[in-house]
Amino acid sequence: MIGRRWYVPWLFLLPSLLVLGVFYWWPIANTGVLSMTDAHAIRGGSFTGLDNFVRLAGDPFFRNALKNSAVFTIGVVPLLVILPLLLAVLVNAKLPGMSFFRTVFFSPVVASMVVAALLWGWMLRSDGLFNWVLIRLQILNEPVGWLTDPALALISVMFVTVWKGLGYYMIIYLAGLQNVPEELHEAATVDGAGAFRRLWSITVPLLRPTMVLVATLAAISAIKVFTEVFVLTGGGPRRSSQTLVPYIYERGIVGLEMGYASAMSIVLFALVLVFTVLAGRLTRKRAQA
């Protein structure tokens, strides 16, 4: 009887599979096809094989966007792994008022990234609040172009990204901290271990799977960053803060070069896939150890 009803589980899965097929697998397959054409949104296109990928190798703007994405990821991910962990340990302490601080740290997550970027754009402009405060405190003598200086534009965007993500990853760490036995901390305290020693020798080892998850999510988000760059700098002076997704937008949506933009999207997909596979293998090795 069970063998004759093998299709029953698939009937339950069918709605989800249809949604995934229409909104996930089909767009990916279509992007792969378009990446091998010179498709243009208006004049159409024809099959060109790997020409778009050859063109990518010689495109200085693509190399610059790829470099900025790498710098952005390397700069943001460690901060989003360490700082939320410290915040989670802090607000997990059984002290008066911790619920209030949890809400304060998590509140940026609720706000739209567009709204947050517009707010920080106002504060970081040359005549904005940030420069005004620093000049009043006599830390600066004159306004700094946080969003217009090629040396500072990408760093400013990274700062906003870290600020926005702290609360989200803090909640993930808080969930992991609930699985850390309190008896271990109590025993370590009796043995004379301080707060930092307990954090390093007990909390961090037990939270390694959570840290891998946070690092993976943060890396994928950093590679795909768009809103902050687009709203705050639009790529910045001399494309100093233009990352991969804004460049795909520039070529595909503004320039209407759908084939070329699709080739860049395939590269982006490959990068995200590599991070995901490496993180999965690392997690499995930790679990087996």
Image (tube, helix red, strand yellow):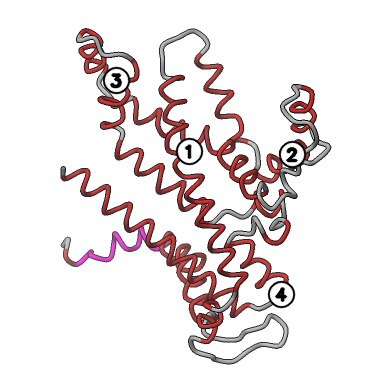
The residue closer to the viewer here, 252 or 85, is 85
Q: Which amino acid lies under the numbered mark 1 shown in the image of this protein?
A: Leu
The residue carrying mark 1 is 79
> Which quadrant holds the C terminus?
top left
What is the x, y in percent for residue 173?
40, 31
Tell me the CA gap for discs 3 and 4.
55 Å
Based on the displayed image, in which of its 4 quarters is residue 1 positioned? bottom left
The residue closer to the viewer here, 233 or 28, is 233
Q: Which mark is residue 197?
A: 3
Residue sitting at 50 percent across and 36 percent down? 168
**Residue placed farthest to the right in the image?**
127
Neighbor class of circle 4 (other Cα within 10 Å; few <14, some 14-19, many 20+) is: some
What is the x, y in percent for residue 245?
59, 62
Helix, strand, or loop for circle 1? helix
Tell me the CA gap for discs 4 and 1.
35 Å
The residue carrying mark 4 is 255
Q: Please report whichever mark, 1 or 3, sits nearer to the chain's N-terminal start.
A: 1
